[in-house]
Image (cartoon, rainbow, N blue to C red):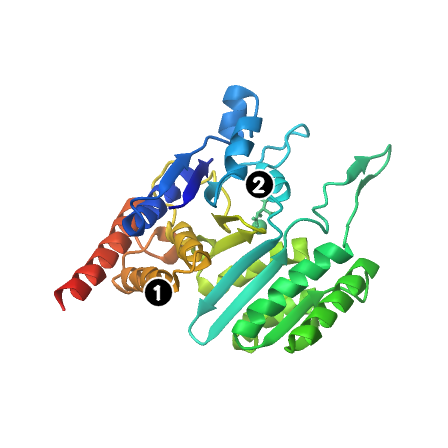
Amino acid sequence: MKRVVVAPGDGIGPEVIPPALDVLRFFHPDWEYIPVYLGYECWKRTGDALSAKTLDVLKKADLILFGAITTPPDPKYHSVVLRIRKELDLYANLRPVFGNGFDILIVRENTEGLYSGIEWQEKDRACTLRVVSEAGSRRIARFASACAKKRRRHLTIGNKANVMKSDAYFLEICMDEAEKAGISIDKKYIDSLVLDVLQHPSRYDVIVTTNIFGDILSDAAAYLEGGLGMLPSANIGKSQALFEPVHGSAPDIAGKGVANPIAAIRCVSLLLKYNGEKPLATEIERAIQKTITDGIKTPDLGGTASTEEVGRAVLQNLVNVKKETVDQ
Ligand code: IPM
Ligand code: MN
């Protein structure tokens, strides 16, 4: 029995989370599902985007399924996603990207770097402090090395150590942890890494990098899978994890019923894997592949199906697999 907090959020979040939740409930009808209301719409209505009560509910969750949040250009508004990552200390942001002949795991540091939140405005300049701590770097380096050890034992360290001392420090710690784990490494400057991942994706296994570099790299890498509608992410802490699509709230297509629910459904796949149920995650991936092969695709993938139609097809494919297994 798990406590799953479900936070659809803003924009297309409330459109893509229901089909994802259907899939999770299909496998775990007896888990506890707790909906929470947060985000920009919540802020407009209540004056608070993330109340202390909601934060408390999130802190008590085992697992969190998260949609997307709109961040308005209001200096008084602090990003809810970033606050949750910090408050729950979800330090590892995993973004798997895989397809024909490639299988990459981007491991993004999720609590510091340029997202340290230490910023100030002076008369004629604004400053953001890029914090790279030993503890923060060591735990993400250890996490990424452990992932690589279970995969193809190779770690690429995305960095800009030629320019920034903070990255030279990050690189040194990552190399140290990789050596302890007995895996091979290569170091790559982040700018050329972004290009090389797109040109030669099969050369990569696990990639570890600092916060904003991981943010940019993962959006670029989404190109390999047909766009942002496909990529899920897992934000992992010591004893909790939050799963959210890499895409944002996409206000331009919100309310039209055409958002691609695959990233959100894949979040469920990551959630189940995290919960030690890898075979179920594989079943979901198969059901998604079949849906795409059958041509049931949202417009971002060149199809004409709606969010609901894709969600229904994936669920139906899962039901069919179960039936076949029972019939045999
Ligand atoms: C992401 C998003 C977030 C980030 C935003 C919404 C704060 O782009 O999860 O990739 O920058 O981390
Ligand atoms: Mn991003």
**Residue 81 marker:** 2
Within-10-Å neighbours for mark 1: few <14, some 14–19, many 20+: few
The residue sitting at 39% across, 43% down in the picture is: 17
The answer to whether 101 is drawn above or below residue 55 in the figure is below
Residue 327 at what x, y percent from top left? 12, 65
Which of 98/195 is in front? 98
- Ligand 1 within 8 angstroms of badge 2 C-beta: yes
Within-10-Å neighbours for mark 2: few <14, some 14–19, many 20+: some
Q: Secondary structure at mark 2?
A: helix
Residue positioned most to the front? 1
The residue sitting at 55% across, 50% down in the picture is: 239
Is 25 left or right of 92, judged from the image as shown?
A: left
Residue 197 at what x, y percent from top left? 58, 70
The amino acid marked with disc number 1 is Pro
The residue sitting at 33% across, 46% down in the picture is: 19
Residue 258 at what x, y percent from top left? 35, 45
The number of callouts visible is: 2
Which of 294/246 is in front? 246
Is 226 left or right of 133, judged from the image as shown?
A: left
Residue position for label 1 = 279
Residue 12 in sight in this render:
no
